[in-house]
Amino acid sequence: MAAHFGRRLRKGAATTAVAAAAVAALSASQAPGATGGDHGRQAAAGASAPVPGADGNSATGNSPYYTDLPPLNSPNPSPSPSSTPSAGTPVPQGDGEAGIPATVLDAYKKAEAELRSSKPECNLPWQLLAAIGEVESGQADGGRVSADGTTLTPILGPVLDGNGFALIKDTDHGAYDGSALYDRAVGPMQFIPSTWAWAGRDGNGDGKKDPNNVYDAALAAGHYLCRNGWDLSRQADLSSAILSYNNSQDYLNTVLSWLEYYRTGGHSVPDGTGGLPSHRSDDGTAHTQSPSPTPSGPPKAKPGSKPHPKPSTPAKPGGSGSPGTPSKPPTPTPTPTPTDTVDHLENAGTPQLTAMAGDTFTERISTRAATKLGGAVAKVRIRFTISGGTDTTFTGGESVATVVTDARGVALAPALQAGEKTGDFKVTATVVGRSPKGVDYTATVTPRAADTLARTSDTPLTCTPGGEFADQVQVKATYRGAVADKVAATATLTKSLLDPSENDQGPYFKDAKGKTVRTLTGLQTDAKGLLTLPKLYADDTTGTFLLRITTTGGAVLTVELKVAAADTSASPTPSPSTSPSPSASS
């Protein structure tokens, strides 16, 4: 969290202890997999176990967060001031807890609307974004944002250098967080740069993806919470999504508390006037305490706050020890993690990657993590990121996927699903949490194709001079025996089998203005692989003519058209006489 949050304290902080009881009940009833006792942070107080199906790296890098809880009162408007409040009567609006700065609230609601359209099955409520925004940044530092939603001053978490926090080495060269050595969580939704690199979105339409902009950050958070096919109306998926944002049971409980609070009401307040929380998970005032040993050295103080007293308990091994006692020998260098031993990534035998538009790629990308001497490294998270001008995604609709290497050091990316945009694109494999050189894979999406065309009717196509053909030409396209839908086609009335150039006489089509045309482009088969041509007309020229239909992929069909005068050689059958029979006269 940004250290400057300590400048202002939120009203109602005293309710934290009271509200803790509500969280305990909420945890028991709403948080599957909750554990007792140790509820602290991963780096400082032991986070809960990793979430199954999560990407393996939280949005925030498990940075500290605000632990203040909402009041137990409903945020709905109270009765008029003249009425006497009774037990359970809601408190008046305006105490900060329910007041969300106008621009920040607008960003949450716009993100909800976009996700309702792009991923309706996710069922993302704006109140969840508000709950996370409150816990992560106090609603963008109380709404200190510009008109376009950009924070007036950067909101930065602590340096993730492994000193009381996770160790995440620099991934953005300091572009977002100002540190060229280690990463820091950035912006109102506290994304670490390595997560923003693939999760970032442009929420305000200015052509940029800025983690310091609340519109961009809220939309990115919405998409992040809606990955993995999660349906946030299901409690299990909701819990998994929140834990993937910050892997702590306390974090889950706190966010759920605010979510339920905002669901019962909430209102807009002017930008810059929102209330701020005052308790953080890393300042020793969290609502639950970890049984972990007291950290060495005083906690980092917020500007404007008094320094915490030095702990009287012995420091962790390797620290300076308590005053007056001999210094302990330095702690031996810890054993490197698997990620630390990765020297490079290499292609593990990925073949040529090609698929037609709309198809699933039959081959999958395979990457191997190796040590400097070429040994395999297992249990390393590999991130695969799609870039380029096509709309190809991994199965499930995402452009990023994270896979853990197996015992051979190999990570097999999910299957690629081609969209409708053709051309080349790139997939880059990188190590999560480290920056050795990645591996790039080039893939190609080709146009939809057909290898066979056939008429759907065997009725001869004939016409008299100056007339119109009674039947329209309809063909069916297939590719390797399967229906070939959305395949581009061209139809041309040609001069002969040997001369496929456009004819200047004989049958013709009409364009929208009724003008004669003998070549049709921009045609496309339908979902059943069918292509029905417009009505054909004949000029005064008689004879046999050819219609040539071609498709992407090489399928060609030539259809005969005959124009001949009406057959008058056969004598018409005499009509029966209508004269009275002679025998009938008298």
Image (cartoon, grey):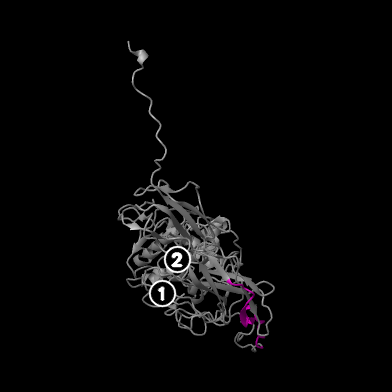
Residue at 49% x, 85% y: name it: 180
Q: How many labels were placed on the picture? A: 2
- Identify the residue under disc 2: 14
Callout 2 crowding tier (Cα within 10 Å): few <14, some 14–19, many ≥20: few
Q: Quadrant of residue 116?
A: bottom left
- Amino acid bearing label 1: Asn
Q: Locate residue 348 relative to residue 15 in the image: left or right.
A: right
Position of the C terminus, as image quadrant, is top left
Q: Earlier in the sequence, mark 1 or mark 2?
A: 2
Residue 298 can be seen, yes or no? yes
Residue at 45% x, 81% y: name it: 175
Which element carries disc 1, helix, strand or loop?
loop
- Identify the residue under disc 1: 212
Q: Position of residue 257 (x, y in %)?
A: 48, 60
Q: CA distance from mark 1 to mark 2?
A: 30 Å
Residue range (magenta): 329-352
Q: Is residue 473 magenta?
A: no
Q: Main secondary structure of the magenta part?
A: loop
Residue at 56% x, 56% y: name it: 482
Q: Nearer the viewer, residue 161 or 340?
A: 340
Q: Is residue 351 magenta?
A: yes
Q: Quadrant of residue 377?
A: bottom right
- Amino acid bearing label 2: Ala
Residue 35, placed above or below residue 473: below
Q: Position of residue 411 (x, y in %)?
A: 63, 72
